[in-house]
Image: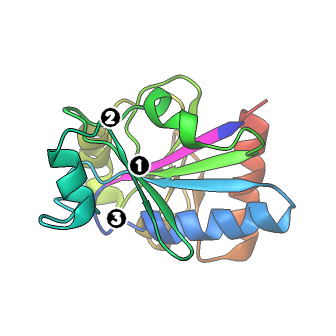
Amino acid sequence: MIIVSLIGLKKSGKTTCVEALVREFKSRGMKVGAVKSMVEAKFTIDTEGKDTCRHQRAGADFVVSLSKDEVAYIEKKPTKSRLDEFMKFIPKDTDLLICEGLQDMDQRIIRILVAKSTDFLAETFRVRGAQENVIALTGIIANETKENSKYPVFNCMWPDEVRELADLILDKSV
């Protein structure tokens, strides 16, 4: 399985890039999964007073919520989740897993840095982690520049560039 993480600051274009890559890899016949990491968000699917929250408070180690067409797994964690902790939920036949915001330093992860602009590039690297395994830049920065001395820059709003980025991901996964 190929694992890619798009990391960047808020409002830098991460979700737009994830959508473009999912569509591109699906068009190639691949089974694609997506993970959204919200480490700084206060969001929870487990709403105070609702049944799932009550199950947790009663002592359940985890809760599975089933609706007409969704399944959600809820497990309270004292720290942010790491790749190995959620891989058990990913179907074994998944070809590509695209993670948005996953800052895990696991060496299996191919990283793409998503930046707002060249002015925010250094801050994005500083805040979102080491430069290990970063293969490219994308996001709003691609509207400003096509060149970077260290990384290729791709605009996920342009289908040709999404294809090129997808090709690079596949090349780097070998």
Q: Name the residue under label 2.
A: 129
- Viewer-closest of 10 and 33: 33
Could you tell me which secondary element the residue under label 2 belongs to?
loop
- In the rendered structure, which disc, 1 or 3, sits on the residue that comes first in sequence? 1
Q: What residue type is labelled 2?
A: Gly
Relative horizontal placement of residue 154, taking residue 143 as reference (left or right): right
Q: What residue type is labelled 3?
A: Lys
Relative to 6, is 71 above or below? below
Dominant SS of magenta comes to strand
Q: Name the residue under label 3.
A: 116
Residue 50 in view here: yes
| Residue range (magenta) | 3-8
Pointer 2 local density, CA inside 10 Å: few below 14, some 14–19, many at least 20 = some
Q: Which residue is drawn at 27% across and 40% down?
A: 60
Give how far apart the Cα atoms at labels 1 and 2 are: 9 Å
Q: Residue 7 carries which label?
A: 1
Could you tell me which secondary element the residue under label 3 belongs to?
loop
* 62 is within the stretch colored magenta: no
Pointer 3 local density, CA inside 10 Å: few below 14, some 14–19, many at least 20 = many
Could you tell me which secondary element the residue under label 1 belongs to?
strand
Q: Disc 1 vs disc 2: Cβ atoms closer than 8 Å?
A: yes
Q: Residue 99 carries which label?
A: none
Q: Which amino acid does label 1 sit on?
A: Ile
Judged from this view, the residue extending furthest toward the front is: 58
Relative to 50, is 168 above or below? above
Quadrant where the N terminus sits is: top right
